[in-house]
Image (cartoon, helix red, strand yellow):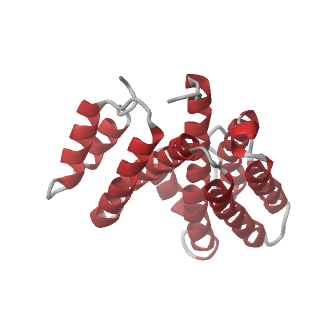
Amino acid sequence: MGVITVDKADHLYWLGRYSERVYTTLKLYCDGYDSMLDADEDFYKKLCVMLDIPNIYTSRDDFLQRYGYDRQDYNSIISNLTRAYDNAIVMRDEIGTETLGYIQMAVYSMDAASVSSAPMIQLQKVVDHLLAFWGCVDDQIDGYCIRGIMKFGKRVERLDLYLRFHMDPNEVRRTYRRMLPRARESQLPINQTAMDALKRYIEAPEMDYEGALSALLEILNV
C-alpha cells in the first residue's frame, strides 16, 4: 500500500463508509418523513427494522428528532456524519482542505435542519454537500490508493445497507459489481474465502441476503 499506513487506511475506509451511511440513510429518512407526518405514524418502527438499529424511540416525533439530530444517539444521522467528519479531519493532509470542507458544510446543514421549521430544505443541502464531497475526491485527490480505499468503503457500506434493506436483487447485484473494482483499487488485504462466499450468495437465483451480509462483514478479516 505504499506510504499509506494501516491507521491511515482505516481512517480513509471509514470516512468512505460513514459518508455513504449518512447519504443512504438520510434519503430513507426523508422518504419516510412525509409518510410519518401524513399517514403512518408508526413507519419509524419499520425504519428501525430496515436499518437494523434498536427501536429506542417513544414516538414518531421522538424518532424524527433523535434519529436525525441527537449526537447522544449512536445510530443517529448526525452521529454518523460526525464520525465521517472526525475521520476527514485526521486525513486533512491526504484528502485536502476543500474536500474536508464539504463534510464540514454537511455538518452545518444538519445542525441547521435540527432547528428549522422546514428541515427538508437543509437536509437536501446535506445530500448536495455529500455529492460535492465525492466529486471533490475525484477532482482534487491525486493518490490512486487514497481514492480507492475511500470508494471501497463507500461501496461496502452501500452493499451492507442494501442487504439489510432486502433491496431488489438486481440493485444489490449492481451494487456488488460496482464494489469489485474498488476492492482492487484499494490495495487492502481481502479475505478471498469471504469474497467467494459473497459472490455465491449474491449471484444465487434466490438471493441469500443474510448469508451475503455475513460474508460481507468478513471480507477484511484476514
Can residue 72 be seen in this snapshot? no
Q: Nearer the viewer, residue 219 or 75?
A: 219
Query: Who's the residue at 32% across and 30% down the image?
Result: 191
Query: Who's the residue at 56% across and 75% down the image?
Result: 39
In which image quadrant can residue 111 be found?
bottom right
> Picture coordinates of residue 9 (x, y %)?
56, 31
Can residue 104 be seen in this snapshot? yes
Query: Who's the residue at 35% across and 23% down the image?
Result: 222
> Picture coordinates of residue 36 (x, y %)?
60, 68
> Picture coordinates of residue 113 (x, y %)?
79, 62
Total label count?
Answer: 0
Left or right: where 74 falls relative to 166: right
Q: Residue furthest left?
A: 205
> Picture coordinates of residue 21 (x, y %)?
56, 50
- Residue 132, relative to residue 198: is it above or below? below
Left or right: where 32 falls relative to 96: left
Left or right: where 91 falls relative to 12: right
Query: Who's the residue at 24% across and 51% down the image?
Result: 202
- Residue 76, relative to residue 13: is it above or below? below
Q: Nearer the viewer, residue 219 or 58?
A: 219
